[in-house]
């Protein structure tokens, strides 16, 4: 898995799970605020701080989540590339060509990762499982914040913590890695339309 795909996959490893009562109550409260759309589109801006680099790396683009089909993560700047996740595969595309494809049946954890991302974007917190301790707060009748600390030793060796915040949708994701790198993604202009195009449907059905 190349560096770009690894970075994107790490940012999408938003897994939570088997919770004590107080955390289960928190997740339930957040779940009542999150919408669970069949399809969700939006734009993102990512700022990644890499240890040893004097300036953060910035990128922006758009994404499509389609329940039961997958996610298209389309970076438009500083260069164009796409990451496509389905229940079966993870693939990277550039210049209308598939550069790399990973089979979820052959890559340990990839299938769970894909399902987790789709659950997050759909607002289905009930499907998240046993990898993070969760703390957080809910504010008023709309907004919320969650902090995820890895339980799994393998994840704990990579990720220090993940912070999420939002309202009816996830709006901000911040991830701090053990190596000193950090990433922040801001989601904007979220919409449940238009429907997937023929090209998008084709990518998700490959």
Image (tube, rainbow, N blue to C red):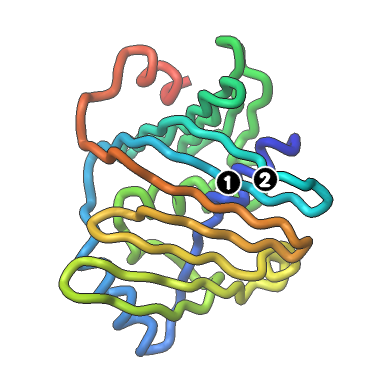
Task: Count up the numbered dots.
Answer: 2
Does residue 19 appear left or right of residue 95 in this picture? left
Task: Left or right? Give the position of 151 relative to 194.
Answer: right
Which residue lies most toward the top here?
Answer: 96
Residue 146 in percent (x, y) is at 42, 71
Q: Residue reaching furthest bottom?
A: 21
Please tell me whether residue 95 is drawn above or below residue 56 in the rendered image. above
Q: Is residue 40 above or below residue 15?
A: above
Where does residue 8 sit, x and y in percent of width and height? 60, 42
Q: Nearer the viewer, residue 120 or 139?
A: 139
Q: Which residue is mark 1?
A: 47
Disc 1 secondary structure class:
strand
Q: Residue at x 33, y 74 (%)?
A: 27
Residue identifier under label 2? 56
Image coords of residue 174 (percent x, y): 53, 59
Q: Mark 2 and 1 residues: CB-CB less than 8 Å, in contact? A: yes
The secondary element bearing badge 2 is classed as loop
């Amino acid at each position: 898995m190349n560096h770009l795909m690894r970075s994107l996959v790490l940012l999408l490893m938003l897994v939570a799970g088997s919770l004590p009562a107080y955390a289960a109550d928190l997740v339930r409260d957040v779940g009542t605020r999150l919408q669970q759309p069949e399809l969700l589109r939006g734009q993102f801006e990512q700022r990644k701080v890499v240890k040893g680099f004097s300036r953060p790396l910035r990128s922006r683009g758009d994404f499509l989540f389609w329940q039961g089909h997958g996610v298209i993560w389309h970076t438009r700047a500083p260069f164009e590339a796409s990451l496509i996740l389905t229940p079966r595969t993870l693939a990277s595309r550039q210049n209308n060509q598939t550069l790399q494809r990973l089979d979820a049946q052959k890559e340990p954890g990839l299938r769970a990762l894909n399902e987790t991302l789709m659950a997050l974007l759909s607002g289905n917190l009930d499907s998240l499982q046993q990898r993070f301790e969760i703390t957080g707060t809910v504010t008023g009748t709309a907004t919320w914040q969650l902090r995820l600390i890895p339980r799994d030793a393998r994840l704990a060796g990579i990720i220090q913590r993940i912070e999420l915040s939002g309202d009816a949708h996830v709006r901000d994701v911040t991830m701090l890695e053990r190596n000193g790198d950090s990433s922040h993604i801001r989601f904007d202009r979220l919409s449940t339309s238009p429907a997937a195009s023929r090209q998008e449907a084709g990518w998700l059905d490959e």
